[in-house]
Amino acid sequence: MRQSRTQTPSVRFLKKRPEKGAPVIPPTATYTVATDVLFRELEGELVLLDTRSANYYSLNQTGTRVWHLLSSRTTIGDICEGLSSAYQLAEEELMADLIPFLQELQDVGLIHRQD
């Protein structure tokens, strides 16, 4: 059995602030999980395996919640609204964290935007 490379990118939701000039994503946008990604929840976190690259990723509890919502093809606006009520935060603040998180997932090929 070949040992896989592990990677720990900053795909930990709500850990970093967006950079200026972050992409604008409309609230009606949806994403799909890439077909080459396997995932399993372990001890409150989600572990993702990109079978193309053999890279592992982990998401914290909030990132796990977002991932499950993405898996059900929920719009970004609905995800933000649900997180806003769950965490008692303004939707604008959540969107400022959500967009870079989605962009990072997309950049490493774990999700694809549907237009």
Image (spheres, helix red, strand yellow):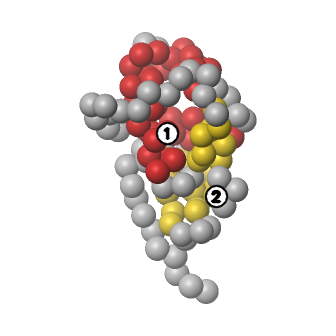
- Residue 77 vs 4, above or below: the answer is above
Q: Residue 66 carries which label?
A: none
Mark 1 surroundings: few (<14), some (14-19) or many (≥20) residues within 10 A: many
Which residue is label 1 attached to? Answer: 102
Is residue 45 visible in the rendered structure shown here? yes
Q: How far apart are marks 2 and 1 (CA)?
A: 15 Å
Asked which secondary structure carries label 2, the reply is strand
Q: Where is residue 50 in the image (x, y as percent from the top left)?
A: 58, 62
Which residue is label 2 attached to? Answer: 37
Residue at the farthest left position: 20
- Residue 106 vs 74, above or below: the answer is below
Dividing the picture into quadrants, the one containing residue 14 is top left
Identify which residue, 4 or 28, lies in the foreground.
28
Asked which secondary structure carries label 1, the reply is helix
Is residue 79 visible in the rendered structure shown here? no
Q: Position of residue 24 (x, y in %)?
A: 44, 27
Residue at the farthest right position: 72
The amino acid beneath tag 1 is Leu
Please give the name of the residue rendered at 39% of the width and 55% of the height, measured from the top-left corner.
9
Please give the name of the residue rendered at 46% of the width and 31% of the height, measured from the top-left corner.
98
Q: Is residue 92 left or right of residue 61?
A: left
Please give the name of the residue rendered at 42% of the width and 16% of the height, measured from the top-left corner.
92
Identify which residue, 74 or 41, lies in the foreground.
74
Which of pointers 2 and 1 lies earlier in the amino acid sequence?
A: 2
The amino acid beneath tag 2 is Val
Residue at the farthest bottom position: 1
